[in-house]
Image (cartoon, rainbow, N blue to C red):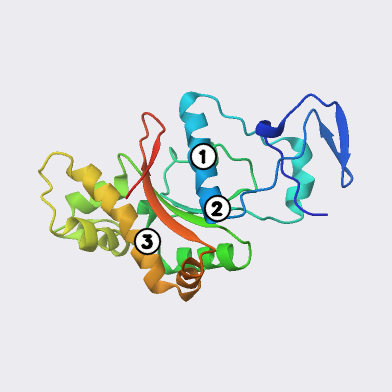
Amino acid sequence: MGTLRLSVSAVLAVGLTIFGGVLVTNAMIEPASPDTPDAALAELVAGNARYVAGNSESHNLPAARSGLADGQAPFAAIIRCADSRVSPEIVFDQPLGELFVCAVAGNVPTPEIIASLEYGVSALGCKVIVIMGHSSCGAVSAALEYRDDTSALPGSLPGLIDQIVVPCVENLDVKAPGALNKAIACNANEGIGRLLKCSEIIAGAVKDGSLKVVAGVQDLQSGKFTLEK
């Protein structure tokens, strides 16, 4: 049996339904996931608009668990910051099974993250990759604060924070108004070039039109996700 997806965008009061041996209560099967990069991106934008307006529709109902256990076919992959305030499933109003999410402090495309995304694209069929920065990012703040000597940071953090410092903070006037926001946007955008440079799989999918790679920043206070141009 294939993956069963449920979403409140498709919920109608239809009583009890049998689908592939799974009992679905008061729900209909969700329409097919977006099948093109443009449609996938449009769905994420629409989902974020619902979330910001307080009209989120996605629920993760018990009836969906059996289908999800059999496999996954997410339409989008997300690199998000390792931050308790950032959840793509909530921010983009999507049920489980629709987003392939990778997390690392500073949403930096590390080799491990890139390999995971290659799996999402080549094996799972993701149509869009979103590099998801967010306001008040602690990793980018650390890059600003310690840009002259990241070795002062504890543990393994210097190696990670250096990947933000070099392209986005090294030559930035850290005292200028909006410096942190500028660095956050730069860091998200920097991930696009890094993915295309480091992954033949991702670059090839972009070239043949089966994939888009975009970047943006979520404002934690409003919840709004804004694509960077």
Say which residue appears at 63% left-offset and 62% top-offset: 124
> Mark 3 is on which residue type?
Ile
Say which residue appears at 44% left-offset and 40% top-offset: 84
Look at the numbered discs 1 and 2 and tell me whether their residues touch, using CB distance below 8 Å: yes
> Mark 1 is on which residue type?
Phe
- Residue 110: horizontal and vertical position, in percent? 40, 65
User: On residue 92, which mark appears?
Assistant: 1
Of mark 1 and mark 3, the one earlier in the sequence is 1
Q: In what element is the residue under mark 1? A: loop
209 left or right of 164 in image: right
Of mark 1 and mark 2, the one earlier in the sequence is 2
- Residue 35: horizontal and vertical position, in percent? 62, 54
Name the residue carrying label 2: 76
Between 164 and 7, the one lying in front of the other is 7
- Residue 80: horizontal and vertical position, in percent? 44, 50
User: On residue 192, which mark appears?
Assistant: 3
Mark 2: few/some/many CA within 10 Å (<14, 14-19, 20+): many
Q: Distance of mark 1 from mark 3, alpha carbons?
A: 20 Å
> Mark 2 is on which residue type?
Ala
Q: In what element is the residue under mark 3? A: helix
15 left or right of 50 in image: right
145 in relation to 125, above or below? above
